[in-house]
Image (cartoon, rainbow, N blue to C red):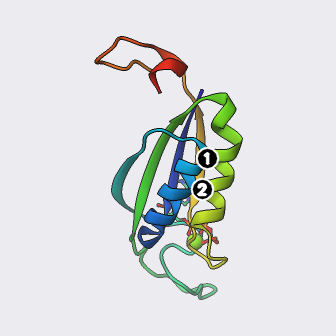
């Protein structure tokens, strides 16, 4: 199992949710976040110039997935979240040791 953490453009949420559903992802957590990447929140870099970092609003998506869904889920996020322009976001993948479905006590893939 993996925990997929993706930072995406807020207006891409519906597309990403739909694509993940089609890929077989059964649940999703979304958080409003702010961040910056290589351009430090600016659309242009001014060489040698000092400037403050701007934090830009993004959405953080977290999806716990079984190994058989993982490849399709990654493909779905990168395809649905992309525009081809700077600031499209980033995907982080973390190994997931344990999942527990609280109501039933099921664990791991059965709990997803
Ligand atoms: N190294 C990082 N660690 C944690 N969060 C990051 C990192 N890089 C980017 N992010 C998050 O992803 C968001 C979008 O980053 P962004 O897509 O601008 O990355 P980038 O590396 O600058 O790529 P690009 O050149 O395509 O813009 C940031 O606002 C931040 O929330
Ligand atoms: Mg960037």
Q: Looking at the image, is mark 1 or mark 2 earlier in the sequence?
A: 1
Q: Position of residue 70 (x, y in %)?
A: 65, 38
Q: Is mark 2 within 8 Å of ligand 1?
A: no
Tell me the element at label 1: helix
Could you say which disc has been placed on residue 23 in the image? 1
Mark in front: 1 vs 2:
1
Q: Does the rendering let one see residue 63?
A: yes
- Quick one: which residue is furthest to the left in this view? 103
Q: Is mark 1 within 8 Å of ligand 1?
A: no
Quarter of the image where one finds residue 81:
bottom right
- Please give the name of the residue rendered at 59% of the width and 52% of the height, measured from the top-left corner: 91
- Quick one: which residue is furthest to the front in this view? 22
Q: Position of residue 6 (x, y in %)?
A: 52, 52
Image position of 34 with respect to 106: above or below: below
Task: Ligand 1: give its quadrant.
Answer: bottom right
Q: Quadrant of the N terminus?
A: top right
Would you say 111 lies left or right of 74 here?
left
Tell me the element at label 2: helix
Q: Does the rendering let one see residue 98?
A: no
Would you say 44 lies left or right of 17 here?
right
Question: CB atoms at circles 1 and 2 under 8 Å apart?
Answer: no
Q: Position of residue 62 (x, y in %)?
A: 46, 44
- Please give the name of the residue rendered at 54% of the width and 85% of the height, measured from the top-left corner: 43
Image position of 46 with respect to 68: above or below: below
Image position of 36 with respect to 47: above or below: above
The residue lying toward the viewer, choosing from 72 and 98, is 72
**Mark 1–mark 2 distance (CA, rounded to whole Å):** 10 Å
Which residue position holds label 2? 77
- Please give the name of the residue rendered at 40% of the width and 75% of the height, measured from the top-left corner: 54
Could you say which disc has been placed on residue 79 in the image? none
Image position of 92 with respect to 77: above or below: above
- Please give the name of the residue rendered at 57% of the width and 56% of the height, measured from the top-left corner: 19
């Amino acid at each position: 199992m993996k925990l997929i953490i993706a930072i995406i453009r807020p207006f891409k949420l519906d597309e990403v949710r739909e694509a993940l559903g089609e890929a077989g992802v059964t649940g999703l957590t979304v958080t409003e976040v702010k961040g910056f990447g290589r351009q430090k929140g600016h659309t242009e870099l001014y060489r040698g110039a000092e400037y403050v970092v701007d934090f830009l609003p993004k959405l953080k998506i977290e999806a716990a997935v079984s190994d058989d869904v993982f490849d399709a889920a990654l493909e779905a996020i990168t395809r649905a979240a992309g525009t081809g322009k700077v600031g499209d976001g980033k995907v982080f993948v973390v190994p997931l040791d344990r999942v527990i479905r609280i109501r039933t006590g099921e664990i791991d893939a059965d709990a997803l």
